Every structure is written in structure tokens, then in C-alpha cells.
Image (cartoon, grey):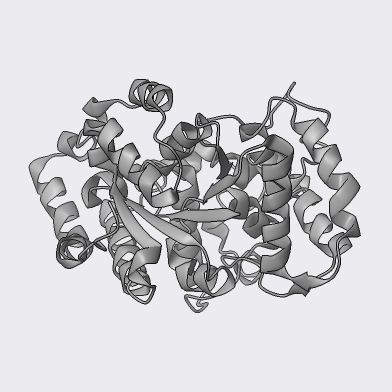
């Protein structure tokens, strides 16, 4: 089984890459597999403990409680998702975690695939979480006839050391985007805004920066109710004043820490992919990516991929800002930009 993880800060085009990879007949393109596991657990880390089959299945099939669902639904991304009319599960009753984005991106019949997993996974033996994940990936690859597994969870970069420890055999593709554009995109995305407001709520409540979601919920200051507690108000969340530099600093910190972690890996196990390069020359970049992940660069796949990208998107977002605001954004992104500029890509990479 060939396993590759696409790691990033989020908001850097990795969703587009997942959709492109989905078009390759030999690739099992897993989208946001770890997102919903983290959502169910209310944790920023992936599970790393031993579990038996029933416990593992419970994690995969667990729905978010209805009262907790709204903030995660506000982070909806493009691409296939389990929604009204797509299956037998409903938001009121709860949609299983693995049905949120993973199964709908693999098949047009997610319920049938869910039932196939439900018939097998609960019977698995006890083993480390990573072993359960490998077995699940292998089962999906077998059922769907797609032997090369490429998983992409937006924002997985911060937990790269943990992912490498649990999957030492895996390859990694670091996808990144121009800092100011990425930070501006973060500022317009509900998920990143929730994280920023959550951090501000912890500060106002006098809690430490590493306070858990449960701790913040218990000590929620009045002004954040409705933003981080039900009934959730998306309009208020998007209007809440958050400086753009907040997102720029977050992007820069994630890039610097992530690159440090990448350089702890064997140089042949990782490579980089720049969003802007993929937009401008998809055939070349995807051919290199195919070589790295050991899949054939099929002409039909490359032609389809070219139709899925829009070169005009490169640099378009931040260029709309007033000059002084753009200058402040670039300044806040500078540490991450410098780290990308001075970090060599492995010779075997892209």
C-alpha cells in the first residue's frame, strides 16, 4: 500500500488538489479524514492510542451532537459532501463522521460504502490507532480498486511530527501558497475565524493559550455567546472584528514550525508543491507529483486537471487590499515567507 499525506496550513489550494487527484483512476483521494475525527473529539491532535474494532468504528461512525454541529457546518468546503438528499442520515439524527466528506468524495453511494465498512471494521482486533487507520485505508483502496492512497486534511501541518511518528513509511507533500493571499483567505473562512475568536475568548476569560474547547465553553465571556455557543450566528462571526495580521501571524508560525518538522524527515520522503505553480503549469507540476507518489501521469488525467484550475486566481486576493493594509499583511507574513525562501526542497522532490 502506497500512502502519502498532503500537509498544509489550510486555505492553500489543497482542496483543489484533492479534487484533481480524485480524477486519477489509481488514486484513493481521501479528503478531510482527520478533520471530523478531531471535531468529534474536540481535539487538535489525531488519535494515537490502541483501540479495538468496536472502539475504532464508534469513532468513525460517531455523529456530532446536534447542538455542536453548527460551528463545524459553517466550515463547509467545496466538493462532494454528505447533505440533504444524499443519503439516509440527517443532521437532526446525526451524520457519522466518516460520511461528512470522506465517503462522498469516494463514491456516489456513500451509504452503501458505509454499510460495507460497518460489516467489517467492528470485528477488527485491538491495535495502535495508526494500524487501524492503515487497515481502513487499505480496505477502502481494495473496495474501490484505487491502490495509491493520498490523504489531505487542511491544516494538518501543525501535527506533522505526530503523523510522521505514527506513519513512518508515509510520504509527505507540503502544499503552500503566497502568505498574504493565504492569510486573507483564512480571514474569510468560518473555521479559521472560529479558531481566532476562540483564542480571544480564552484570553478574555483569563485562560491559558492551550485551554481546551471544553474549558473555554465553561468560562465563556458573555460577548462571545452566539459566536462560540448555540444558537450559532454565522453573520456575527463573519462580522466580528479580527485584524488581518492575526491570520498572517498564524500562517507564518505554522509555516516556520512545519518546515522545521519537515527537515527532521528523511529527504526522500517529502517534497513541496506551490499553489501558484500548480495554477500556472498544472501539467508540469502534476507530472512531478505523479513521479513522487509513483502513479502514472495519464494524459487524460492531466487534461482534466488543467480544466479544473484557474490561473487567474494566483495573487488575486491580497492585491485588492489598500497599500498600507497589504504592507502590514506582508510584514506579518515575512518570517514564514523568509523560511520558504531559504528552505531547500529535497532534490528528489518537486
Measured from the top left, where is residue 12 in percent x and y?
35, 45
State the residue at coordinates (44%, 41%).
238
Residue 225 appearing in the image = no
State the residue at coordinates (34%, 62%).
250
Position above or below: 273 against 89: below
Measured from the top left, where is residue 86 in percent x and y?
73, 24
Judged left or right of residue 167, residue 331 is left
Measured from the top left, where is residue 245 in percent x and y?
26, 57
Which is nearer the eye, 74 or 117?
117
State the residue at coordinates (67%, 48%).
230
Number of residue marks: 0
Which is nearer the eye, 313 or 171?
171
Judged left or right of residue 28, residue 345 is left
Position above or below: 61 against 342: above
Position above or below: 168 against 283: below
Can you tell which quarter of the image residue 90 is in?
Answer: top right
Which is nearer the eye, 39 or 33?
33
Measured from the top left, where is residue 62 in percent x and y?
79, 52
Position above or below: 345 against 316: below
State the residue at coordinates (76%, 35%).
91
Judged left or right of residue 125, residue 223 is left
Residue 117 appearing in the image = yes
Quarter of the picture containing the N terminus is bottom right
Judged left or right of residue 177, residue 189 is right
Amino acid at each position: 500500500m502506497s500512502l502519502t499525506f498532503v500537509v498544509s496550513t489550510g486555505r492553500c489550494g489543497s482542496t483543489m488538489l484533492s479534487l484533481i487527484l480524485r480524477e486519477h483512476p489509481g488514486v484513493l483521494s481521501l479528503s478531510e479524514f482527520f478533520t471530523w475525527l478531531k471535531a468529534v473529539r474536540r481535539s487538535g491532535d489525531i488519535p494515537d492510542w490502541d483501540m479495538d474494532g468496536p472502539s475504532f468504528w464508534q469513532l468513525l461512525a460517531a455523529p456530532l451532537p446536534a447542538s455542536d454541529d453548527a460551528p463545524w457546518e459553517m466550515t463547509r468546503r467545496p466538493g462532494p459532501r454528505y447533505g440533504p438528499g444524499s443519503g439516509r442520515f440527517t443532521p437532526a439524527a446525526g451524520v457519522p463522521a466518516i460520511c461528512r466528506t470522506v465517503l462522498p468524495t469516494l463514491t456516489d453511494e456513500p451509504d452503501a460504502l458505509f454499510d460495507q465498512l460497518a460489516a467489517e471494521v467492528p470485528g477488527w482486533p485491538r491495535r495502535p490507532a495508526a494500524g487501524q487507520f492503515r487497515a481502513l485505508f487499505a480496505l477502502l483502496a481494495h473496495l474501490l480498486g484505487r491502490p495509491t492512497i493520498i490523504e489531505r486534511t487542511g491544516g494538518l501541518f501543525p501535527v506533522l511530527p505526530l503523523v510522521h511518528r505514527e506513519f513512518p513509511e508515509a510520504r509527505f507533500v507540503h502544499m503552500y501558497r503566497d502568505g498574504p493571499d493565504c492569510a486573507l483567505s483564512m480571514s474569510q473562512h468560518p473555521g479559521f475565524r472560529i479558531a481566532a475568536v476562540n483564542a480571544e475568548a480564552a484570553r478574555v476569560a483569563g485562560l491559558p493559550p492551550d485551554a481546551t474547547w471544553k474549558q473555554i465553553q465553561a468560562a465563556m465571556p458573555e460577548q462571545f455567546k452566539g459566536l462560540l455557543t448555540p444558537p450559532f450566528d454565522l453573520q456575527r462571526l463573519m462580522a466580528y472584528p479580527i485584524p488581518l495580521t492575526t491570520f498572517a501571524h498564524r500562517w507564518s508560525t505554522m509555516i516556520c514550525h512545519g518546515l522545521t518538522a519537515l527537515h527532521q524527515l528523511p529527504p526522500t520522503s517529502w517534497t513541496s508543491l506551490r499553489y501558484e505553480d500548480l495554477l500556472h503549469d498544472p501539467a508540469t507540476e502534476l507530472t512531478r507529483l505523479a513521479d513522487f507518489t509513483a502513479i502514472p501521469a495519464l494524459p487524460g488525467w492531466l487534461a482534466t486537471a488543467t480544466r479544473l484550475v484557474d490561473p487567474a486566481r494566483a495573487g488575486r486576493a491580497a492585491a485588492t487590499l489598500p497599500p498600507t493594509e497589504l504592507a502590514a499583511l506582508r510584514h506579518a507574513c515575512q518570517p514564514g515567507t523568509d523560511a520558504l525562501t531559504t528552505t531547500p526542497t529535497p532534490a528528489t522532490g518537486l
